[in-house]
Image (cartoon, helix red, strand yellow):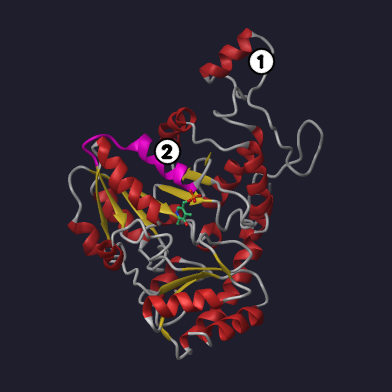
Amino acid sequence: MDQDRKPLGLNTRTIHAGAHPDPATGAVAPPIYQTSTFAFADCHQGAARFAGDEDGYIYTRMGNPTTARLEEALAELEGGAGGLATSSGMAALCTVSFALLNAGDHLIGTSSVYGPSRVVMERDFARFGVASDFVDTSDLDAVRSVLRPETRLVFVETPANPTIDLADIAAIADVAHDHGALLMVDNTFATPILQRPLALGADLVMHSMTKFINGHTDVVAGMIVPASRELLDRIRPVHSYLGACMDPHQAWLALRGLRTLGMRVRTAQDNAGRIAAYLEGHPKVEWVRYPGIASHPQHELARRQMDGAGSLISFEVSGGVDGGSRLLDSVELMTLAVSLGGIETLIQHPASMTHAAMSRKHRLAAGITDGLVRVSIGCEDVDDLIADFEQAFAAV
Ligand SMILES: *Cc1c(COP(=O)(O)O)cnc(C)c1O
């Protein structure tokens, strides 16, 4: 390509990244290589592939052409050295941690991180001698205060789930690097359309592609994108042995979803902006958290760090737990379900659902109050969503 050409836009890249006609048939859509293993022409070729002297496939746990396209696409969109697709977002987190942490190491995480991420790091990694502290990563001093000489990984979710708190990626990268630690960002909520953590200094990005990237509420999938070849090479062997690999059909579905990511993210975001304003003006709403409105404590950081505020909104319904459950029991168009980032609007109550495994003390300390409702705004016509809120609020 002409070197002087302007870099391609994000929408264009989302549609074309890792997309090339199939070399064997010219198929424009990616073929699904639904095979567990790949034949070698002869022993010499088999040996060369195992030794890494020749490119090519061996066994699907170690790599597959359909999955490779998705890995290539995410690596390009995040600006990383490569991608490692995993069976789920949790598998991405566990694979990275298993690859990079040793007994005696310490990690720091965002206190309101996705519930199971915290449980696995705090409870299960502790069994292998990895200590952790979970702090409000929107506060740099809170991060600094728990740094130890053994801190090897800082794991930040921004925007965080479900408080919609942001962390300053560039500033935390500096703090982590000054202490010889790596920074990993869970970029599930923002997606590369709205935020590119590697360009801000993070060392790794992970995704639950179950959410926005696949976007159609029909696949569970994850991805790891390290910034450097060195990190990619450290994680790749563990990725291939640990067994949290992606299935080719799963990869094909996620690729299909990825191609419309830009359109979906922007449509949902436009809807969310309108709904956040509606909720802010509603007498039965105590407060609204959405990075796109001036009342968000990190509105300025959102403008600096992100290319848009996304489509996740949290708010507190008056009447606490009871008010929240009445609202949720009364919605008709919106679906009462966990997960997020699909084309349909989902509404949930973290205290009784996603974050129920956390103690109430930890939950409140992380800002997840009893009446907090989180809504993942979808791509429906926004007036229909507002009408659904109207009729549901009438029951509160
Ligand atoms: C859902 C989610 C995960 C876990 O991903 P799975 O695909 O469900 O394993 C991790 N981080 C965030 C922010 C999530 O929303």
Image side of residue 153 versus residue 322, left or right: left
Which of pointers 2 and 1 lies earlier in the amino acid sequence?
A: 1
Image coordinates for residue 196, horizontal then vertical, percent: 48, 57
Residue found 74% across the figure and 38% down from its top:
31
Point out which mark residue 388 bears.
none
Residue 186 found in image quarter: bottom left
Mark 2 vs mark 1, CA separation in Å: 29 Å
The stretch of residues the image draws in magenta is 89-105
Q: Is residue 3 left or right of residue 110?
A: right
- Residue 6 spot, x, y in % from top left: 63, 58
Q: Main secondary structure of the magenta part?
A: helix
The residue identified by callout 1 is 40
Q: Nearer the viewer, mark 2 or mark 1?
A: 2
Looking at this view, is 298 or 387 the one in front?
387
**Residue placed most toward the observer, 255 or 163:** 163
Disc 2 secondary structure class: helix
Reply yes or no: does residue 392 show up in magenta.
no
Label 1 Cα neighbours within 10 Å, binned few <14 / some 14-19 / many ≥20: some
Residue 226's place in the image compared with 136, above or below, is above
